[in-house]
Image: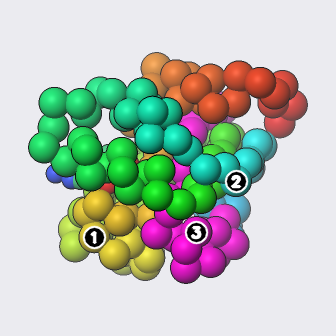
Amino acid sequence: MTIERTFSMIKPDATERNLSGDINSMIEHAGFKIIAQKKIRITLEQAQKFYDVHKEKPFYNDLCNFISSGPVVIQVLEKENAISDYRKLMGATNPEQAEAGTIRKKYAISIDQNSIHGSDGIETAQREISFFFSDIEIVG
Ligand code: CMP
């Protein structure tokens, strides 16, 4: 097992409902270290760039509008096997399909307002971490 870092974003539907603390508690109880964290407002242009892998998808415009509609908490999480373990902790993208005990099962409203984002692979994690955290040194 290798120590990995993954990127996490608590989305506007969750910050709006004051769920950042509860979600961080689930993250920490699952053994992740939150080694960097910022609460920010993402511009529409940043959202479009961040999610450009989805730009041909029918949900792209709604997704970018939603992500830029309110504050988000962006994070770097560290743990053995962090990338796939965090995807398990988040649960399925569509909360109707998410397993009990996952963040999305507990808090997500819909597939669009699904409370949390996490990187889907090693290269994505590197890209997403440097997209938002290039300005600070992450000491762990
Ligand atoms: P996220 O992990 O942030 O990655 C892209 C987001 O697009 C996803 O979570 C969902 O919130 C949103 N989305 C909306 N519709 C779909 C869909 N059909 N498939 C995948 N993602 C979707």
Q: Is label 2 in contact with label 3 (beta carbons under 8 Å)? A: yes
Residue drawn at x 64%, y 69% is 20
Indicate which label's residue lies in the foreground, 2 or 1: 2
> Which segment did they paint magenta?
1-24
Residue drawn at x 55%, y 74% is 16
Looking at the rendered structure, which numbered label has been put on residue 110?
Answer: 1
In this rendering, would 124 be left or right of 129? left
- Where is residue 87? Give x, y as percent: 42, 49
Inspect the image, locate mark 3, and give the three-letter code of the amino acid beneath it. Answer: Thr
Q: Secondary structure at mark 1?
A: loop
* Residue 22 location, quadrant: bottom right
Residue topped by disc 2: 39
- Compared to residue 130, the image places residue 9 above or below, namely below
Q: Is residue 58 magenta?
A: no
Inspect the image, locate mark 1, and give the three-letter code of the amino acid beneath it. Answer: Ser
Q: Which class describes the residues within 10 Å of circle 1: few (<14), some (14-19), or many (20+)?
A: some
Q: Secondary structure at mark 2?
A: strand
- Compared to residue 117, the image places residue 52 above or below, namely above
Cα–Cα span, label 2 and label 3 = 9 Å
* Residue 133 location, quadrant: top right
Q: Is residue 13 magenta?
A: yes
Residue topped by disc 3: 15
Inspect the image, locate mark 2, and give the three-letter code of the amino acid beneath it. Answer: Lys
Q: Nearer the viewer, residue 102 or 21?
A: 21
Residue drawn at x 66%, y 49% is 40
* Residue 111 location, quadrant: bottom left
> What colouring does the structure picture have?
rainbow
Residue 116 visible in the shown view: no
Q: Which class describes the residues within 10 Å of circle 2: few (<14), some (14-19), or many (20+)?
A: some
Q: Tell me which numbered mark, 3 or 1, is placed earlier along the sequence.
A: 3
In this rendering, would 116 be left or right of 38? left
Count of labels in the image: 3
